[in-house]
């Protein structure tokens, strides 16, 4: 259901044509082109993570929205946080962007309501006084959400492979 977030401009008229999302490019150029084209067809500007930070800053400076998946393994480049009774690697990029540009921060998530149907939700996240507070607040929200229903766990795409538990 995370792919439904690219329809964000359809749901929020104030940000139509003003939303960008950071994505991981695929190694296969033809497949990457198809994925990028299909994800951007609703008006979302796709930003490669290769230059994502600077491009995202420019979008925030124009008062546009920037979206990214906050719950992916940060491969040791993020912070170690507690999540679902484990230590995992989490990205600090949302907090860094929010604090650098004083941006409002939300968790946007699709709730499955039927086959290929979802209702979009937007939960405000307190930025706190440091970028890590956004990471902690988002992960706390996700843990509470996942613990509240077995169905939520089944619908959360990244849960099965999100652990970046330290090996040392």
Image: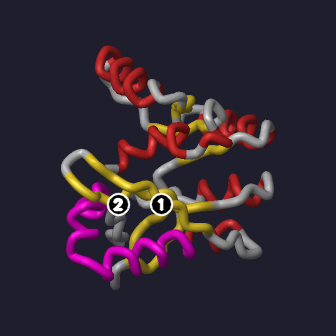
Does residue 121 sit above or below 59 in this rendering? below
Q: Is residue 159 visible?
A: yes
Task: Determine the image quadrant of residue 166.
Answer: bottom left
At a point 47% along the width and 60% down the height, the residue shown is: 121
- Residue situated furthest bottom in the rendering: 85
At a point 47% along the width and 72% down the height, the residue shown is: 139
Mark seen at residue 12: none
User: Picture coordinates of residue 72 (x, y %)?
Assistant: 40, 56
Q: Report helix, strand or loop for mark 2.
A: strand
Q: Whole-Å distance between the Cαs marked 1 and 2?
A: 7 Å
Q: Report helix, strand or loop for mark 1.
A: strand
Query: Which residue is under mark 1?
Result: 121
Q: Is residue 75 visible?
A: no
Span colored in magenta: 136-161
Task: Determine the image quadrant of residue 53.
Answer: top right
State the residue in front, 10 or 31. Answer: 10
User: Picture coordinates of residue 43 (x, y %)?
Assistant: 54, 28
At a point 35% along the width and 26% down the height, the residue shown is: 35
At a point 62% along the width and 69% down the height, the residue shown is: 125
Count of numbered marks: 2
Query: Which residue is under mark 2?
Result: 111
Return the disc, 1 or 2, that comes first in the chain's sequence.
Answer: 2
Q: Main secondary structure of the magenta part?
A: helix
Left or right of 74: which side holds 19? right
Q: Are marks 1 and 2 in contact (CB under 8 Å)?
A: yes
Residue 115 counted in the magenta span: no
The C terminus lies in which quarter of the figure?
Answer: bottom left
Left or right of 65: which side holds 68? left
Residue 145 counted in the magenta span: yes
Does residue 50 sit above or below 96 in this rendering? above
User: Picture coordinates of residue 58 (x, y %)?
Assistant: 75, 35
């Amino acid at each position: 259901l995370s792919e439904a977030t690219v329809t964000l401009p359809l749901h929020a008229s104030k940000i139509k044509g003003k939303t960008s999302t950071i994505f991981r490019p695929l190694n296969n150029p033809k497949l990457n082109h198809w994925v990028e084209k299909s994800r951007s067809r609703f008006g979302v500007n796709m930003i490669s993570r290769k230059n994502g930070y600077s491009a995202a800053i420019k979008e925030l400076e124009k008062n546009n929205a920037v979206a990214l998946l906050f719950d992916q393994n940060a491969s040791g480049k993020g912070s170690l946080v507690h999540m679902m009774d484990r230590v995992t690697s989490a990205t600090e990029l949302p907090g860094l962007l929010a604090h650098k540009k004083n941006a409002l921060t939300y968790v946007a998530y699709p709730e499955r309501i039927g086959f290929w149907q979802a209702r979009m939700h937007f939960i405000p996240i307190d930025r706190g006084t440091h970028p890590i507070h956004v990471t902690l607040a988002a992960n706390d929200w996700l843990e509470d959400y996942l613990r509240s229903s077995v169905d939520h766990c089944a619908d959360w795409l990244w849960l099965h492979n999100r652990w970046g538990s330290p090996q040392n």
